[in-house]
Image: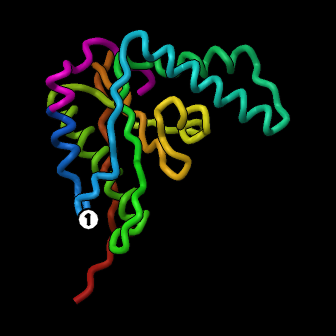
Amino acid sequence: MGNLDEPAPTRAQIESAIECAATAPDHKKLRPWRFIVTQGEARHELGRALLEAAQAKALQDGEELSEKTIIKTQNMPLRAPLIITAVTQMQEHKKVPPFEQMLSAGAAVQNLILALKAQGFSTVWRTGLLCNEPAVKAYFGVGEDDYVTAFVYTGTSPKDESKRKPIDIELLVRFES
């Protein structure tokens, strides 16, 4: 799904979805995830941060961005009326390794998506190569050792969502007795 339209969820609907997200498995209740809701004009600010990240990455790689890439990058956040960004703030803990904290963040994002879907909204979980570049981390106030885990584009689908093909789970599971 490329783009989503209005209506987006209300503040109350978002808060309800985040309450569901917060029920994710979370060893020692560290709550390593946070959510940042971006909508309206703030999406343009996010677009500028993404462009800054893309330009820095291109410079580092000895490349130059085309005008088409510049426009596309700036407009990424405009593909939905609302974006819920999940960030993972890794915490030192002798019993909870970083990978468990990242898995907890992923579970929280999945719960968020399911809660939004249950309220009738469509979502697209995006990240991409720029999400953890310094300019994007700085925009969200994310530490160097932390992560932007998900951009959950949220709104209403302009068309019926396509049905997923059945998945053959035979190669995905092993039963032992």
Across and down, in percent, residue 18 comes to: 21, 37
Q: Residue placed at 76% from the left, 19% from the top?
A: 66
Q: Does residue 101 show up magenta in the picture?
A: no
Q: Is residue 108 above or below residue 42?
A: below
107 lies left or right of 19: right
Tell me where the magenta segment starts and ends, as one range. 1-15
Q: Residue placed at 34% from the left, 60% from the top?
A: 168
Q: How is this picture coloured? A: rainbow
Across and down, in percent, residue 106 comes to: 35, 51
Q: Nearer the viewer, residue 93 or 131?
A: 93
Q: Residue placed at 33% from the left, 36% from the top?
A: 35
Q: Is residue 72 above or below residue 123?
A: above
Secondary structure under tag 1 reads helix
| Residue type highlighted by circle 1 | His
Q: Residue placed at 54% from the left, 16% from the top?
A: 75
Secondary structure predominantly adopted by residues drawn in magenta: loop
- The residue positioned farthest toward the right in the image shown: 62
Across and down, in percent, residue 63 comes to: 82, 31
Identify the image quadrant of the N terminus. top left
Q: Nearer the viewer, residue 62 or 110?
A: 62
Callout 1 crowding tier (Cα within 10 Å): few <14, some 14–19, many ≥20: few
85 lies left or right of 131: left
Mark 1 lies on residue: 27
Q: Is residue 43 above or below residue 161?
A: above
State the image quarter where residue 136 is shown. top right
Across and down, in percent, residue 92 comes to: 41, 64
Identify the image quadrant of the C terminus. bottom left
Please tell me how many numbered marks the rendered image carries: 1
State the image quarter where residue 173 is shown. bottom left
